[in-house]
Image: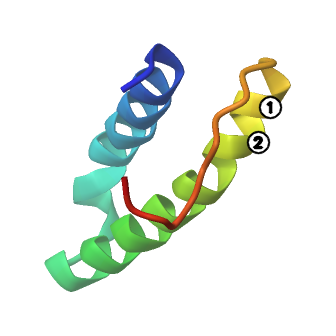
């Protein structure tokens, strides 16, 4: 995993972890976590392009 991805996901998970207990019951936290994860996956390629790092994302297997 490249350093940008590692820092990005660590930040997203850390902030979500800090807010976790105040978000409500377990099913609500699970739903919020899923939404945050989907948004994070959509935003990361944009952050890579802002930093000038081109990463070839594909749905094709290795």
Toward which corner of the image does residue 47 lie, by quadrant? Answer: top right
Q: Residue at x 22, y 56 (%)?
A: 21
The N terminus, quarter of image: top left
Q: Residues within 10 Å of mark 2 (few under 14, many from 20)?
A: few
Q: Residues within 10 Å of mark 1 (few under 14, many from 20)?
A: few
Is 62 or 15 nearer to us in this picture? 62
Residue 33 placement (x, y as % from top left): 35, 65
Say the numbered circle drawn on residue 46: 2
Q: Determine whether 17 is above or below 30 in the image.
A: above
Q: Residue at x 68, y 43 (%)?
A: 45
Say which residue label 1 marks.
Answer: 49
Residue 9 placement (x, y as % from top left): 41, 36
Q: Along the horizontal axis of the image, is 41 left or right of 29? A: right
How far, Cα to Cα, is label 1 from label 2?
Answer: 5 Å
Residue 52 placement (x, y as % from top left): 81, 18
Is 20 or 51 nearer to us in this picture? 51
**Looking at the image, how many numbered discs can be counted on the residues?**
2
Q: Along the horizontal axis of the image, is 40 left or right of 34? A: right
Q: Residue at x 67, y 49 (%)?
A: 43
Pointers 1 and 2 in contact (C-beta within 8 Å): yes
């Amino acid at each position: 995993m490249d350093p940008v991805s590692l820092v990005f996901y660590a930040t997203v998970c850390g902030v979500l972890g800090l807010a976790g207990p105040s978000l409500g019951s377990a099913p609500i936290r699970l739903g919020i976590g899923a939404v945050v994860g989907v948004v994070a996956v959509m935003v990361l390629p944009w952050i890579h392009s802002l930093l000038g790092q081109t990463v070839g994302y594909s749905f094709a297997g290795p």
